[in-house]
Image (cartoon, rainbow, N blue to C red):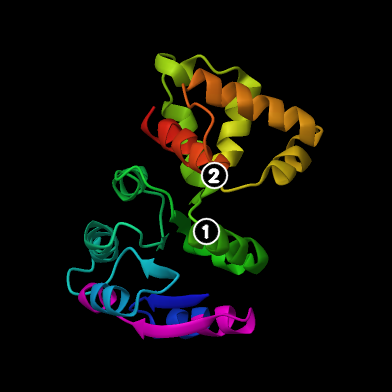
Amino acid sequence: MRIVIADDSVLLREGLQLLVAEAGHEVVAAVGDGPSMVEATLSLRPDVAIVDVRMPPSNTDEGLRAAVEVRRQWPAAKVMVLSQYVEVSYAEELFASGAGGVGYLLKDRVSAIDNFLDGLEQVAAGGTVLDPQVVAQLMLRRGSGGPIGSLTPREVEVLSLMAEGRSNASIAEALVVSHGAVEKHTQRIFAKLDLPPDDSQHRRVLAVLAFLRA
């Protein structure tokens, strides 16, 4: 993969470069502020951009703003946003376009290298990846109404793990059930959310977006 990295911390920026390079990927640009991230991503068109939420010049949510701006100008852009803290509102804004190819992870997850790289590859492939802590907060505030409210507790578990970017095989392992059982649950989830047969990845993205907005 060709990757753009945007983080104002030189240490983390260089660490991410080393991590992805050792995994066989190419870092085409490494920048330290929001405007530079937008410029580099739009000009170089990487397979995925990794961006910190808080960067200069505002040091608030500049990275998020940059990611949203990139996707506004280039809807096909794939972006993995890293944050120090859980902010569900950030995830909602990032996913608001309704398209896949978006991830939102806490920086702590980077230390789980294999999981981080797997999530990065899923985002680059058009999937969605939400940090487990973001999913946990969404679960706490989830209402009982609407299509999401019609899901069984097991279906909610499956959808929560789907939101984390897990494959059916990974979900089966986490829930200690068969792959076939997970497939049946996912099909029932798609039916209850009124997602007709389509590209499998596309339906998974739409299901996760419905969960995010519930």
Instruction: Give the total number of marks visible in the rendering.
Output: 2
| Magenta span contains residue 30 | yes
Is 123 or 173 nearer to us in this picture? Answer: 123
Q: Amino acid at mark 2?
A: Gln
What range of the chain is rendered magenta?
17-37
Taking the image as drawn, is residue 130 in sight? Answer: no
Q: Tell me which label, 1 or 2, sits earlier in the chain.
A: 1
Taking the image as drawn, is residue 129 in sight? Answer: yes
Q: Is residue 112 left or right of residue 92?
A: right
Q: Is residue 36 left or right of residue 105?
A: left
| Magenta span contains residue 179 | no
Image coords of residue 186 (percent x, y): 62, 29
Is 162 or 199 nearer to us in this picture? Answer: 199
Image coords of residue 188 (percent x, y): 61, 21
State the image quarter where residue 169 is shown: top right
Please, is residue 197 above or below residue 118 in the view? above
Residue on which disc 1 sits: 125
**Which residue ends up furthest to the left in the rendered image?**
58
Please, is residue 95 above or below residue 180 in the view? below
Using the image, tell me which numbered label, if any, was put on residue 99: none
- Element type where label 1 sits in the image: loop
Using the image, tell me which numbered label, if any, was put on residue 201: 2
- Element type where label 2 sits in the image: helix
Please, is residue 4 above or below residue 96 in the view? below
Please, is residue 162 above or below residue 79 in the view? above
Q: Residues within 10 Å of mark 2 (few under 14, many from 20)?
A: some
Is 1 or 176 nearer to us in this picture? Answer: 1
State the image quarter where residue 77 is shown: bottom left
Q: Are marks 1 and 2 in contact (CB under 8 Å)?
A: yes
**Which residue ends up furthest to the front in the rendered image?**
198
Residue depicted at 18% across the width and 74% down the height:
57
